[in-house]
């Protein structure tokens, strides 16, 4: 069916929303190249080589480490029957509930010189042995790996579950050993899932602010934040931001391209999936021990410490009445932003799925720009725009909410899009034929059908906003500290106990969203 | 009874409506108790925004006349002077200022005043170093200290201010040699926190470090047996003196609550305020009538640098460029 496309009032609304979401970035691009460009050359000579090396080596290091952890755990869980398998199945998703800055702050305590890990290590290996400082590449690598390997795990697990066993059997019938089969048949077959998870992990590493700032590891995103807060010209920050966004965009297109190329790998016909093989006593022990270590490092120990510190802070009376204010601020801000995101995202998703003209799809794609915009960059965009062009709104909650919208609408938009696509347009058509007007059709027919998907989108965006750190630090109005800001401020001062209550609360609030994530169909490609 | 209800029972209520908005670059743990005390005793409510000093200057600059901030507190005079140069501050007209605050510790037009002094000094391990061999901070840049020195990261505002003072006192060649020397000598012993430097010296991992003085006393308060001591250098006739910076407060150019702001500034200059502000962190009160915490060497026992703190502002950008060019970490 070919639709005759007209520019309806709804189209103009879509254009308006897309402009609102993309204009700040365009303004950054504009400012980066206006004015004195001598700073750029300076930046090129001094900071850039280090930032590029650090950012890329961290991205590669974390990719390799998360692939190893994520794929091996997923493989064991889908293929073998061992103790507590049902628990590990969802247990390895739990680390996603810990924001990177919380994990980083716990690890600065654990790995610091003279900290508990070094002490126990010295007890084993002698007093002169020192561990690498957490404020280093190693520290950032450990924290980011533990924080992001669940993404790889989720995608690899889904791929292994939907995997046609016949290929492996064929390989083994031809005389391939088990290792050969794994590396030459199984792994290549789940390549789309691996690429998709690498994409997620790299984007996460490159745009992370919380962990690298507490571990003081100079990446692009951290350098941009420092440039905004420690220097007096925004232009250098704008230039760095532009470079980072370009890099992320290239990466995004590369991933899209690869995904299209790899459709070839999908299997058709009857799929036989594996039945988990039972394990021997020794195998059971080895798996349990190694899984326990990973779980303790990524979730168990941090949460245990947070609980312990919270109890200490509580009994010392250090959890004051202001704590409730921070909870209130976080909840009100995030709920407003998530609701606004739903309101702005609906027209975009609706237009793109019901009237997929080039214009409408472009509007939708525009909204996805926030996907490649790290928090400090989004904040910088709004800082520049609002101080130069709309100064009376600067320093108000409005700007902060806009930053959340730009940054997190993409995450919700995906869920909203797929919910809308699942509604048969014939139902809407029928309602219209019976004389129902556009808005009424949407609220009486479409909305009830997408309610579940939209609720999930709302919850996801709400929780992302609760965890948001850099934009909140830069744009919060006075007296509007959020839980995340408190964790960061106290952790920067190494006041571990004071940072714990808000951190623990964020973790607890995040657990529902994590379960939502783990249930999602993660099949890639 | 009838009369009572008609009469204003809570007299301080009218002043309780007063508010002062504080932008602060000082750690909340150090400033909050002081502000809480002020709030309790005067009934004036305080709203606090904590962030980086330079970040707050940027914020003041962006907000122009609409800024909600009445006063700006920092840990370092450079940021205050930068704010003054950008016309973000206005002169404080309290009568006591000239008599209470020594001239070296306030802006020429009194738009900011120092509240407490913090010295950038050497910390040494008493088992490993004979202090009589170190006369100047600059000595730490000589090759004999290779692998024995710990320094703060390039982002440290104290390193930037300290190097600026060397630059102002001794010129560019000397300050560059100093920066290069400590970079090579420290190598990997570069720390984000002063506390960690003091720790490394106490454990004997390195024998000397450069830190703000109060970190040494904070460590000694926790562990009195620790083999560490401060070393105040450059005391010889004509030498540059020890490097002293101040934490201070400025009145913003577009303050909406000037009288409440003045009330707060007056409190912070008063003996009670000075004691609370400085002693919570073992810093030197600028009000000469208030003695420093007995744990630290008395202010009369050493000579501080005479370079005006106002120069920190103009030297800030050049020194950051130089620190970056030389590749300090």
Image (tube, coloured by chain):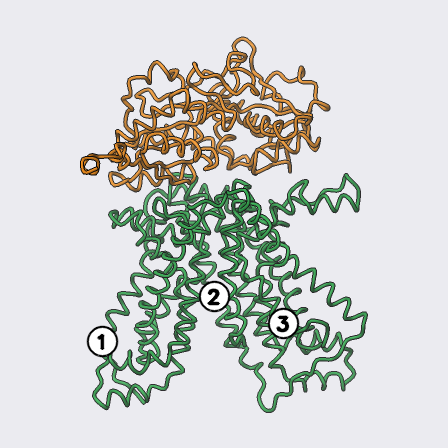
Chain colours: A green, B orange
The disc numbered 3 marks a residue on which chain? A
Residue A7 shows which numbered tag?
1
**B206 or A433, which lies in front?**
A433
Give percent across and percent down for residue A332.
36, 57
Q: How far apart are labels 2 and 3 at the CA level?
A: 30 Å
Locate residue A330, reporting x and y percent. Answer: 41, 55
Q: Is residue A99 left or right of residue A61?
A: left
- Secondary structure type for disc 2: helix
Which one is earlier in the sequence, the residue at label 1 or at label 3?
A: 1
Between B12 and B317, the one nearer to me in the picture: B12
Count of labels in the image: 3
Q: CA distance from mark 1 to mark 3?
A: 49 Å
Q: In the image, residue A93 lies at what x, y percent?
A: 58, 66
Q: Residue at x 58, y 18 (%)?
A: B232
Disc 1 with disc 3 on a shared chain: yes
Label 1 is found on which chain of the structure? Answer: A
Q: Where A251 falls versus B3 (above or below)?
A: below
The disc placed on residue A89 is 3
Q: Does residue B162 appear in the picture of this structure?
A: yes
Q: Quadrant of the N terminus of chain A?
A: bottom left
Marks 1 and 3: which is nearer the front? 3
Task: Write the residue at 58% across / 70% down.
Answer: A154
């Amino acid at each position: 069916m070919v639709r005759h496309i007209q520019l309806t009032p709804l189209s103009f609304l879509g254009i308006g929303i897309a402009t609102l979401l993309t204009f700040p970035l365009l303004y950054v691009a504009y400012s980066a190249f206006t004015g004195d460009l001598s700073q750029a050359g300076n930046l090129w000579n001094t900071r850039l080589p280090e930032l590029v090396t650090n950012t890329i080596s961290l991205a590669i290091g974390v990719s390799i480490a998360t692939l190893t952890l994520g794929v091996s755990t997923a493989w064991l869980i889908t293929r073998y029957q061992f103790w507590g398998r049902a628990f590990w199945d969802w247990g390895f998703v739990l680390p996603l509930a810990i924001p990177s800055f919380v994990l980083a702050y716990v690890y600065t305590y654990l790995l610091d010189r003279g900290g508990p890990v070094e002490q126990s290590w010295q007890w084993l290996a002698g007093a002169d042995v020192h561990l690498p400082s957490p404020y280093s590449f190693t520290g950032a690598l450990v924290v980011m790996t533990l924080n992001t390997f669940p993404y790889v795990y989720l995608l690899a697990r889904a791929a292994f579950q939907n995997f046609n066993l016949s290929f492996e059997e064929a390989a083994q019938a031809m005389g391939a050993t088990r290792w050969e089969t794994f590396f030459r048949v199984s792994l290549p077959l789940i390549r789309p899932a691996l690429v998709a998870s690498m994409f997620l992990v790299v984007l996460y590493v490159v745009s992370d602010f919380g962990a690298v700032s507490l571990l003081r590891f100079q990446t692009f995103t951290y350098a941009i934040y420092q440039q905004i807060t420690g220097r007096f010209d925004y232009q250098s920050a704008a230039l760095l931001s532009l470079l980072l966004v370009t890099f992320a965009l290239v990466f995004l297109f590369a991933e899209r391209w690869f995904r299209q190329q790899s459709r070839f790998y999908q299997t058709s016909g009857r799929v036989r999936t594996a039945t988990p093989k039972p394990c021997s006593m020794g195998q059971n022990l080895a798996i349990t021990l190694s899984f326990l270590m990973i779980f303790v490092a990524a979730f168990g120990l941090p949460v245990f410490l947070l609980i312990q510190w919270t109890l200490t802070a509580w009994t010392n009376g250090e959890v004051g009445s202001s704590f409730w204010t921070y909870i209130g601020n976080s909840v009100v801000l995030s709920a407003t932003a998530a609701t606004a995101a739903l309101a702005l995202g609906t027209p975009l998703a609706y237009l793109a799925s019901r009237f997929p003209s080039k214009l409408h799809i472009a509007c939708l794609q525009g909204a996805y720009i926030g996907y490649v915009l790290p928090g400090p960059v989004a904040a910088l965009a709004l800082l520049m725009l609002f101080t130069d062009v709309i100064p009376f709104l600067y320093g108000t909650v409005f700007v902060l909410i806009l930053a959340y919208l730009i940054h997190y609408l993409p995450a919700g938009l995906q869920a909203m899009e797929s919910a809308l696509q699942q509604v048969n347009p014939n139902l809407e058509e029928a309602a219209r034929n019976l004389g129902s007007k556009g808005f009424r059709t949407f609220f009486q027919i479409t909305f009830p059908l997408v309610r579940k998907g939209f609720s999930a989108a709302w919850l996801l965006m709400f929780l992302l906003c609760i965890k948001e750190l850099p934009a909140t630090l830069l744009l919060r109005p006075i007296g509007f500290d959020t839980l995340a800001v408190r964790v960061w401020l106290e952790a920067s001062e190494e006041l571990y106990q004071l940072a714990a209550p808000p951190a623990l609360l964020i973790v607890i609030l995040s657990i529902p969203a994590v379960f939502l994530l783990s249930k999602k169909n993660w099949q890639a490609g | 009874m009838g009369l009572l209800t008609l009469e204003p029972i809570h007299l301080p209520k009218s002043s309780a409506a007063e508010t002062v908005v504080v932008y602060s670059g000082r750690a909340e743990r150090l400033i909050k108790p002081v502000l809480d005390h002020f709030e309790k005793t005067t009934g004036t409510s305080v709203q606090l925004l904590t962030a980086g000093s330079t970040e707050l200057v940027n914020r003041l600059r962006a907000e122009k006349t609409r800024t909600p901030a009445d006063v700006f507190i920092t840990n370092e005079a450079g940021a205050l002077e930068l704010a003054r140069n950008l016309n973000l501050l206005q002169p404080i007209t309290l009568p006591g200022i000239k008599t209470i605050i020594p001239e070296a510790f306030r802006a020429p037009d009194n738009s900011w005043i120092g509240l407490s002094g913090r010295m950038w000094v050497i910390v040494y391990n008493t088992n490993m170093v004979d202090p009589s061999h170190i006369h100047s901070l600059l000595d730490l840049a000589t090759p004999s200290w290779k692998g024995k020195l710990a320094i703060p990261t390039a982002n440290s505002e104290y390193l930037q201010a300290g190097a600026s003072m060397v630059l102002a006192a001794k010129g560019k060649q000397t300050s560059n040699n100093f920066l290069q020397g400590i970079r090579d000598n420290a190598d990997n012993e570069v720390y984000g926190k002063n506390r960690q430097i003091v720790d490394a010296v106490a454990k004997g991992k390195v024998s000397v470090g450069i830190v703000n003085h109060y970190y040494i006393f904070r460590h000694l308060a926790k562990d009195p047996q620790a083999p560490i001591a401060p070393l105040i250098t450059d005391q010889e006739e004509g030498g540059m003196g020890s490097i002293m910076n101040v934490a201070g407060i400025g009145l913003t150019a577009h303050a909406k609550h000037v009288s409440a702001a003045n009330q707060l500034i007056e409190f912070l200059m008063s003996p009670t305020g000075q004691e609370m502000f400085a002693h919570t962190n073992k810093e030197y009160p600028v009000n000469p009538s208030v003695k420093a915490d007995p744990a630290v060497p008395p202010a009369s026992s050493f000579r501080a640098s005479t370079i005006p703190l106002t120069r920190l502002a103009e030297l800030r950008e050049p020194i950051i460029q130089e620190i970056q060019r030389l590749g300090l970490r």
